[in-house]
Image (spheres, coloured by chain):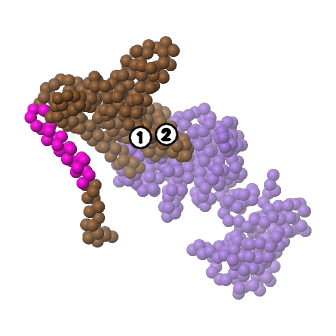
């Protein structure tokens, strides 16, 4: 049934443009960043400066919080979507996916209009007796970033989790109950083990995105917040740019995000495995 | 180990469908099949007994204990679902051991008991496999073992054979019956397959539109259906509208004599003639078929459809006044049928 070899060879040429683009815009820049990072003592300087370690930890903490919030909201939304009619679900999915098309800058601007010093919600809360300065102060910091990140990460979580909820057979819950399981045990022993790998995969995926994101952060808090992407931004934008150090930070950021993504991939593969077997 | 249902009422909010006035007793060890077209309420009935739905009125007693207010987890009822509902992340052994785990049986003992249950189901070799790695029939056996391993008070089967292919279905049917007998457990078996119901059950309940139409042993259900619907749903049937006139039943195909007690003169009734009770007339035997004097109505006609079913042949015979469905094992050309009085059943008048 295999097509003749010459045809296969000819088809291979079709891959050429893709390979070319990949080489020009991915492999080449990556190689030059790696080469730059290896130059001189950039890596040594990176690990000698405590503020970079702080930035890394702050980034991870920010990513974890944003991912956790997105996951909690996303689980609720996906679980509900699975119960509505297919037509309504399709309509809602379009709405939910909309934030995916916004640039981080637009998201930041929207949040400033909502929760900034003169934001709609801020003014509303002021009427209820809240201190606008305190709200804005909290908003123009990690807390605001967690909110803004969750805004565009939640749709990703929903899109990842929806198939899991749709595929889950509710009769398993009935089966568990008929066998004598209290509801909480059915959730913990029957539902959770089946959905947990996908939850973990979704968490890691959006955490990696949050750790690497910088557009929203730059627009909301400027460069004074010590997180890795903003460190990187100031290294290449300030006067007297330090390109070797910037490359070293890039490599660190890349390594961290790749490691998180690897966990996500392994978890996703596991849940897929379980589904295929189902 | 009995199921006693009386005056059971349930309505789905919204559609208004449900069940009403259900009285049904399954004595200890008896196997009761519930049949009916889709939407007749048979699955609703099963869900009510399992406790997944709460009745609006009526009583459900398992082994004499009223379970109206008992949640499903405490009812001690084994349920086998249509799609088996095995837990995909557990092995066959873990699936069967799960109800024991829930009952606090120590790990070693539950492994032993679950292993024993799998061995009885000829599945020892598959104990460590997950449901996705088992065939439909194997999953079915695991589901059955899981539903019985904790010695439930009743067994509920929700179309457990519908997902199997025809070849496995007959074998699995016998296996379910054998396991049920061995456990001596009252069983409610919901199915839309009337042949399956007749062959497996001690008693068959026919439902339609949320009501229980008839509860009877298979033979009685087939021979003495209470109305047109049951007669048509259980087995094949020739049904005629008839009027009693001069000691005969006037039907569109002609006057029929019967051995059943005749309703009063002029009454409108429904007449049932099972296809296998007809006597087909082959070309070579026309003269003697007409000459025989036993009160039978002789109908001559032509075969419009002829279905070969292996051991059996089912044919449509177009006669004056209608079409007759007949069955025979003979392969000779058929030109008519005789309708002997013994084949003619008068259905009770419908309320």
Mark 2 vs mark 1, foreground winner is 1
| Residue B62, quarter of the rendered image | top right
Q: Chain of mark 2?
A: A
- Find disc 1 in the rendering and name its residue: A101
Say if mark 2 contacts mark 1, CB within 8 Å. Answer: no
Binning the other alpha carbons within 10 Å of mark 2 as few (below 14), some (14 to 19) or many (20 upward) gives few
Residue B100 in view in this figure: no
Q: Residue extending furthest left? A: A40
Q: Main secondary structure of the magenta part?
A: helix
Nearer the observer, B207 or A91: A91
Q: Which mark is residue B39?
A: none
Q: Colour of chain A?
A: brown
Which chain appears purple? B
* Cα distance between the residues tagged 2 and 1: 11 Å
Magenta span: A20-43
Would you say B22 lies left or right of A78 here? right
| Residue B245, quarter of the rendered image | bottom right
**Figure quadrant of the N terminus of chain B:** top right
Label 2 in the same subunit as label 1: yes
Residue drawn at 47 percent across, 34 percent down: A76
Nearer the observer, A12 or B17: A12
Q: Chain of mark 1?
A: A
Q: Position of residue A64 (x, y in %)?
A: 32, 30
Residue drawn at 31 percent across, 70 percent down: A3
- Find disc 2 in the rendering and name its residue: A95
Dot 2 or dot 1: first in sequence order is 2
Q: Position of residue A195 (x, y in %)?
A: 40, 40
């Amino acid at each position: 049934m295999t097509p003749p070899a010459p045809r296969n060879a000819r088809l291979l040429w079709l891959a050429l443009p893709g390979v070319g683009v990949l080489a020009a815009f991915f492999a080449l820049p990556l190689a030059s960043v790696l080469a730059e990072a290896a130059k001189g003592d950039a890596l040594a300087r990176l690990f000698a400066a405590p503020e970079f370690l702080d930035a890394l930890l702050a980034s991870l903490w920010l990513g974890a919080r944003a991912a956790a919030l997105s996951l909690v909201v996303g689980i609720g939304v996906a679980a509900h979507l699975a119960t509505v009619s297919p037509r309504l679900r399709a309509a809602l999915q379009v709405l939910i996916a909309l934030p995916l098309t916004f640039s981080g800058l637009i998201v930041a601007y929207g949040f400033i209009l909502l929760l900034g010093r003169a934001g709609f919600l801020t003014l509303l809360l002021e009427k209820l007796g809240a201190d606008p300065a305190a709200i804005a102060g909290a908003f123009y910091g990690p807390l605001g970033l967690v909110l803004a990140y969750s805004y565009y990460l939640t749709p990703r979580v929903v899109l990842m989790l929806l198939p899991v909820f749709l595929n889950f057979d509710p009769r398993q819950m009935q089966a568990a109950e008929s066998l004598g399981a209290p509801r909480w045990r059915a959730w913990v022993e029957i539902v959770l083990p089946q959905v947990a790998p996908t939850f973990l995969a979704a968490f890691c995926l959006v955490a990696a995105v949050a750790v690497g994101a910088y557009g929203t952060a730059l627009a909301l808090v400027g460069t004074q917040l010590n997180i890795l992407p903003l460190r990187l931004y100031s290294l290449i934008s300030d006067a007297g740019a330090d390109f070797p150090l910037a490359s070293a930070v890039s490599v660190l950021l890349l390594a961290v995000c790749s490691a998180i993504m690897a966990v996500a991939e392994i978890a996703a593969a596991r849940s897929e495995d379980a589904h295929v077997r189902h | 180990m009995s199921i006693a249902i009386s005056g059971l009422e349930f309505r789905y909010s919204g559609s208004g469908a449900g069940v009403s006035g259900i009285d049904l007793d399954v004595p200890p060890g008896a196997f009761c099949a519930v049949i009916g077209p889709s939407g007749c309420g048979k699955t609703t009935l099963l869900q009510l007994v399992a406790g997944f739905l709460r009745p609006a009125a009526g009583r459900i007693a398992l082994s004499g204990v009223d379970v109206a207010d008992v949640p499903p987890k405490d009812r001690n009822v084994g349920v086998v679902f249509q799609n088996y509902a095995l837990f995909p992340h557990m092995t066959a052994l873990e699936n069967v051991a799960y109800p024991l785990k829930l009952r606090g049986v120590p790990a070693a003992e539950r492994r032993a008991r679950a292993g024993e249950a799998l061995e009885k189901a000829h599945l020892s070799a598959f104990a460590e496999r997950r449901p996705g790695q088992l065939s439909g029939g194997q999953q079915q056996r695991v589901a059955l073992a899981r539903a019985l391993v904790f010695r439930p008070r009743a067994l509920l089967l929700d179309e457990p054979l519908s997902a199997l292919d025809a070849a496995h279905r007959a074998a699995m049917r016998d296996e379910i019956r054998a396991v049920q007998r061995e456990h001596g457990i009252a069983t409610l078996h919901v199915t839309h397959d009337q042949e399956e119901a007749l062959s497996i059950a001690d008693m068959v309940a026919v439902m339609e539109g949320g009501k229980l139409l008839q509860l009877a042993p298979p033979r009685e259900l087939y021979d003495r259906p209470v109305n047109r619907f049951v007669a048509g749903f259980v087995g094949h049937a020739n049904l005629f509208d008839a009027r009693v006139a001069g000691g005969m039943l006037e039907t569109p195909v002609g006057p029929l004599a019967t051995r059943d007690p005749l309703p009063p003169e002029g009454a409108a009734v429904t007449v049932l003639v099972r296809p296998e009770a007809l006597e087909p007339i082959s070309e070579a035997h026309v003269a003697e078929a007409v000459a025989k004097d036993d009160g039978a109505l002789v109908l001559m006609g032509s075969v419009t459809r002829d279905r070969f079913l292996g051991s059996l042949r089912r044919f449509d015979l177009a006669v004056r006044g209608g079409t007759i469905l007949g069955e025979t094992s003979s392969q000779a050309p058929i030109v008519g049928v005789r309708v002997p009085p013994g084949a003619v059943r008068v259905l009770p008048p419908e309320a």
